[in-house]
């Protein structure tokens, strides 16, 4: 299906709501039935009938159809956060006494889920350098049920060879899950490369306006039904209809926003790479990136997220960069309209907390939708103060 068809029309039954161009937010907890028979009929399939909004809501339903089509998946479920989707995907595929293989440096709360939380239920995890699929193969044990991938991750951007990892998981009877938040389905579709479950922090590009926290899980009909009847309905961390409506609006411009962030991101990364106050830029689509060839092979673009190391002799010198940086906001997260910097220097000198492992001269940049030249002027000024 054409991308434009998905973003503009798929799932929208305009005849059912006065031919309105934009779908209504069906802000309701429950749905009524005309007869006992109709009621009975609905309970044959809670995933597809409208009974109660913890299960299926029409506004969320439109969003789910679009998201599934974007990833080339049969089904999508939407959650109250990316972590809601990740925890559902993980919990659905582990059991007491079982084992998970996860790539090094996944999203921090994913790491916490696997490393700190799941051991309480007798599930252990081995973290491996996923840049070499042989490391993953070696880590798979007889009791391994899940392979967790994130390519690239959202700080240092290591990649996995997605096709090779998916093929390995299938051969060893292990379910593969991948966090595809960095690329969005515009630039990478892991399900088409053989991955079983794709999750997103929809908070980032998919909604794209920094006003909704949401999660997405895309997979086969069979796995979606299992997760719907399990984690989705029992844990209940579902997306509210109003947020689903906002996310549908966000998706209208997904392709445009991704192209803009990708182009501006590369332009600014190239500018920074040659700047004397920058030690190194980490961007998967720069030729200096160690896995550049693999990135070009499996990613159609990179969006606006990358990192750099400042060439600063001291924490104080690095602080000057942030204190003189205009036009960028200092904030966590990414994927919205606004350009951001995440200063790792901020994790230093927190009273009562030990210094982190991440170096203080690391800066994560997110390039949004503003004029890239205007952003470069802002960066130039701040770098001159380092
Ligand atoms: C933000 C993020 C998450 C978590 O998503 P939330 O919507 O914040 O729960 C997961 N993975 C990646 C790569 C992220 O950037």
Image: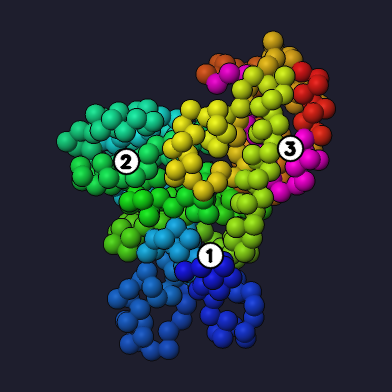
Indicate which disc residue 329 carries: 3
In three-dimensional space, the C-alpha distance between marks 3 and 2, rounded to whole angstroms, equals 37 Å
Which of the 4 quarters of the picture holds residue 319? Answer: top right
Indicate which disc residue 349 carries: none
| Residue at position x 74%, y 37% in the image | 329
Residue 120: percent from left, percent from top: 32, 34
Q: Where the C terminus falls, by quadrant?
A: top right
| Residue at position x 60%, y 39% in the image | 305
Residue 273: percent from left, percent from top: 66, 27
Q: Determine crowd level at label 3: few under 14, some 14-19, many 20+ residues with C-alpha closer than 10 A.
A: some
354 displayed left or right of 139: right
Q: Mark 1 — residue?
A: 3
Residue 304: percent from left, percent from top: 62, 42
Q: Mark 2 — residue?
A: 165
148 displayed left or right of 303: left
Q: Earlier in the sequence, mark 3 or mark 1?
A: 1
Range of magenta residues: 358-376
For residue 207, say whether it is visible: yes
| Residue in front for this viewpoint, 139 or 162 | 162
| Residue at position x 38%, y 55% in the image | 192
């Amino acid at each position: 299906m054409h991308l434009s068809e998905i973003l503009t029309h798929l799932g929208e039954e305009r005849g059912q709501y006065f031919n309105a161009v934009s779908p209504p937010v069906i802000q309701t907890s429950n749905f009524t039935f005309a007869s006992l028979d109709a009621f009975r009929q609905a309970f044959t399939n809670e995933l597809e009938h409208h009974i109660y909004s913890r299960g299926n809501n029409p506004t969320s339903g439109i969003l789910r159809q679009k998201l599934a089509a974007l990833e080339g998946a049969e089904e999508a479920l939407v959650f109250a956060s990316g972590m809601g989707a990740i925890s559902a995907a993980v919990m659905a595929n582990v059991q007491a006494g079982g084992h998970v293989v996860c790539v090094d440096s996944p999203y921090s709360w994913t790491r916490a889920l696997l490393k700190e939380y799941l051991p309480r239920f007798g599930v252990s995890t081995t973290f491996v350098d996923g840049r070499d699929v042989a490391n993953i193969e070696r880590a798979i044990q007889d009791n391994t049920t899940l392979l967790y991938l994130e390519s690239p991750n959202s700080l240092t951007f290591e990649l996995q060879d997605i096709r090779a990892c998916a093929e390995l998981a299938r051969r060893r009877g292990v379910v593969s899950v991948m966090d595809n938040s960095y690329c969005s389905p515009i630039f990478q579709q892991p399900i088409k490369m053989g991955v079983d479950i794709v999750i997103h922090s929809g908070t980032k590009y998919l909604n794209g306006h920094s006003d909704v926290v949401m999660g997405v899980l895309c997979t086969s009909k069979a796995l979606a039904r299992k997760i719907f009847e399990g984690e989705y309905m029992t844990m209940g961390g579902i997306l509210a209809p109003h947020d689903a409506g906002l996310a549908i609006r966000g998706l209208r411009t997904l392709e445009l926003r991704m192209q803009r962030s990708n182009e501006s991101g590369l332009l600014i990364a190239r500018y920074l790479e040659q700047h004397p106050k920058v030690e190194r830029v980490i961007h998967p689509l720069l030729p200096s990136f160690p896995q550049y060839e693999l990135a070009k092979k499996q990613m159609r673009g990179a969006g606006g997220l990358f990192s750099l190391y400042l060439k600063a002799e001291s924490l104080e010198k690095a602080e000057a960069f942030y204190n003189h940086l205009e036009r960028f906001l200092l904030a966590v997260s990414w994927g919205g309209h606004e350009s951001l910097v995440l200063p790792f220097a901020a994790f230093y000198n927190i009273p009562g907390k030990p210094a982190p492992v991440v170096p203080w001269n690391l800066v994560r940049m997110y390039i949004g939708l503003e004029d890239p030249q205007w952003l470069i002027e802002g960066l130039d000024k701040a770098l001159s103060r380092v």
